Amino acid sequence: MENQYKIAAKKLYETLIRIQAWFRGENLHETVYVDPTDDCPYMFSWDYDQGFIFLSDDDKWKKAINIRKVEVMIFLMSQVSDLLTEARTQRDAMIELSDIASHQGLVLLDELSNFSTSRFNQPGFQLSDKTKTLEE
């Protein structure tokens, strides 16, 4: 029976290690959390900077995938889909927000470019090569 326990624990551990590698491979750059539920007493997080799935334990974050903590890994397995969904949602939101911010920056640059040339468009004033913008 002890041997079966070790084999099952190792299989679960190796499966979760592969899932964690999947998180890294998808470039899920945001740190996300899955709160405890009625079915799972643990809070888990994905931290891209460190590249690990963590468990909140007594206000400390510890690696959740640990061969000596089989119960934690079982609960993690029940929550890993939610963690992945949350990480993908955060990634997609950041892509959208980055696009919006980039567009706003380009609009501002366009306004600044028009402002810098419009004040020189007065009679008797000619632009030299030193005052031309890159767009001209």
Image: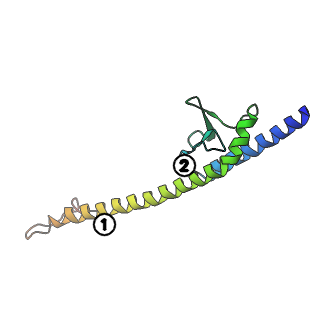
Q: Which amino acid, by three-letter code, is at mark 2?
A: His
Asked whether disc 1 touches disc 2, contact meaning CB atoms under 8 Å apart, the reply is no
Residue lying at 23% horizontally and 66% vertically, measured from the top left: 114
Q: CA distance from mark 1 to mark 2?
A: 34 Å
On screen, 123 above or below 89?
Answer: below
Quadrant where the N terminus sits is top right
On screen, 25 above or below 66?
Answer: below
Find residue 45 and report its horizontal and vertical position in percent: 59, 42
Residue lying at 22% horizontally and 59% vertically, measured from the top left: 130
Return the disc, 1 or 2, that comes first in the chain's sequence.
Answer: 2
Residue lying at 70% horizontally and 42% vertically, measured from the top left: 75
Residue furthest toward the left?
A: 124
Residue lying at 57% horizontally and 43% vertically, measured from the top left: 35
In this rendering, position of residue 63 left or right of residue 107: right
Residue 92 badge: none
Find residue 36 and report its horizontal and vertical position in percent: 60, 42
Find residue 76 and report its horizontal and vertical position in percent: 68, 43
Q: Which residue is mark 2?
A: 29
Tell me where residue 115 sits by quadrant.
bottom left
Q: Which amino acid, by three-letter code, is at mark 1?
A: Glu
Q: How many marks?
A: 2
User: In the rendered view, how is the structure colored?
Assistant: rainbow
**How many residues crowd mark 2 within 10 Å: few (<14), some (14–19), many (20+)?**
some
Tell me where residue 41 sits by quadrant.
top right
At numbered mark 2, what does the secondary structure look like: helix, strand or loop? loop
Tell me where residue 109 sits by quadrant.
bottom left
At numbered mark 1, what does the secondary structure look like: helix, strand or loop? loop
Residue 21 shows in the view: no
Residue 135 badge: 1
**How many residues crowd mark 1 within 10 Å: few (<14), some (14–19), many (20+)?**
few
Residue 50 shows in the view: yes
Quadrant where the C terminus sits is bottom left
